[in-house]
């Protein structure tokens, strides 16, 4: 499936992997709705970059952890562009908590991380599903997982568990929405995004330890996201892109 003239929504699309994915979708000819919760300036800048390159995009606010806001956002995009063909569930948050500090994993932390990272992806998928089914065989979803969900390591225990849940959600949605909608998950390892702010030295030290001796870029992940969206024979797959980090 080619992405030319397809309508795509990228949650958390203004920064990091989301921005790189929005730009790559536009480069491949898609019309892009760049969702943001608080990063309005970054989302509008992403839209501006797409416009400068001759593409078509819009910025749209919505907190994906709210079912109401997710439905409203999806509805506005569908109304604006006449439908929705693909959804990239990229929006995620974390808290930096030592894994051994179980007391710091409070109810508020669990609720916040699962609200965005898991329920948010489900809310957006549920709201978009009727439109995605109408666009079959083009309808597709890519969720963003993490190797934290595979290894149990990561910025915090609740984050790792939330990403493991994303991997499971992907398989369940793939079954629930088949055959009209394909659902896959891209699982990055370390990626050079703003999540490493203040820990750049740690990131640089990691690179030589990886088999490919490089930390992935947002553009690396964006290419795999778009490839998964385009592949009509792929669903329910958890695809790791980590420079061999978990090999």
Image (cartoon, grey):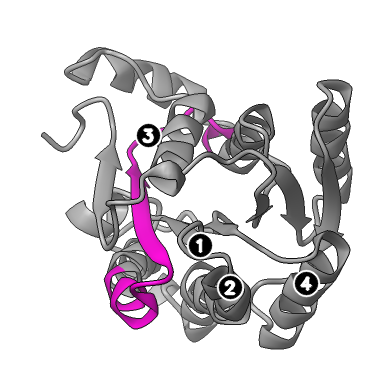
Numbered circle sitting on residue 69: none
- Quarter of the image with the C terminus is top left
Q: Nearer the viewer, mark 2 or mark 1?
A: 2
- What's the CA distance linking mark 4 and mark 2? 18 Å
Question: The residue tagged with tag 1: helix, strand or loop?
Answer: loop
Which residue bears the numbered disc 3? 190
| 119 or 132, nearer to the observer | 132
Question: The residue tagged with tag 3: helix, strand or loop?
Answer: loop
Identified at 55% across, 81% down, the residue is 126
Is residue 190 inside the magenta stretch? yes
Asked if the residue at tag 1 contacts the one at tag 2, i.e. Cβ–Cβ closer than 8 Å, the answer is yes
Please, is residue 242 above or below residue 74 in the view?
A: above
| 134 or 153, nearer to the observer | 134
Question: The residue tagged with tag 4: helix, strand or loop?
Answer: helix
Which residue bears the numbered disc 1? 139
Disc 4 crowd, CA 10 A, few/some/many (<14, 14-19, 20+): many
Which residue bears the numbered disc 4? 73
Does residue 153 appear in this view? no
- What's the CA distance linking mark 2 and mark 3? 36 Å
Which portion, as a residue range, is magenta?
171-196
Location of residue 71 in the rendering, given as x and y in whole percent from the top left corner: 72, 81
Which residue bears the numbered disc 2? 134
Q: How many marks can you see?
A: 4
Sequence order check, earlier mark of 3 and 4: 4
Sequence order check, earlier mark of 4 and 1: 4
Residue that protrudes farthest toward the left in the picture: 247
Sequence order check, earlier mark of 4 and 2: 4
Q: Nearer the viewer, mark 4 or mark 1?
A: 1
């Amino acid at each position: 499936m080619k992405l030319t003239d397809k309508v795509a929504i990228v949650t958390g699309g203004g920064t990091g992997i989301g921005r790189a994915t929005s730009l790559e979708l536009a480069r491949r000819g898609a019309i892009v709705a760049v969702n943001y919760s608080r990063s309005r300036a970054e989302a509008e800048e992403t839209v501006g970059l797409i416009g400068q390159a001759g593409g078509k995009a819009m910025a749209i606010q919505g907190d994906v952890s709210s079912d109401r806001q997710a439905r409203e956002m999806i509805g506005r995009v569908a109304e604006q562009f006449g439908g929705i063909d693909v959804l990239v569930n990229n929006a995620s948050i974390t808290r930096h908590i030592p894994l051994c500090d179980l007391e710091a994993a409070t109810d508020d932390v669990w609720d916040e991380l699962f609200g965005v990272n898991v329920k948010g992806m489900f809310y957006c998928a549920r709201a978009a599903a009727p439109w995605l089914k109408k666009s079959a065989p083009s309808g597709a979803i890519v969720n963003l997982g993490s190797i934290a969900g595979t290894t149990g390591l990561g910025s915090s225990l609740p984050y790792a568990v939330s990403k493991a849940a994303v991997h499971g959600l992907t398989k369940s949605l793939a079954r629930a929405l088949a055959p009209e909608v394909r659902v896959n998950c891209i699982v990055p390892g370390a990626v050079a995004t703003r999540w490493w702010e203040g820990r750049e030295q740690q990131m640089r030290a990691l690179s030589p330890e990886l088999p490919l001796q490089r930390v992935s870029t947002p553009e690396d992940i964006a290419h795999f996201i778009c490839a998964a969206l385009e592949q009509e024979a792929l669903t329910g797959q958890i695809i790791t892109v980590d420079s061999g980090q978990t090999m």
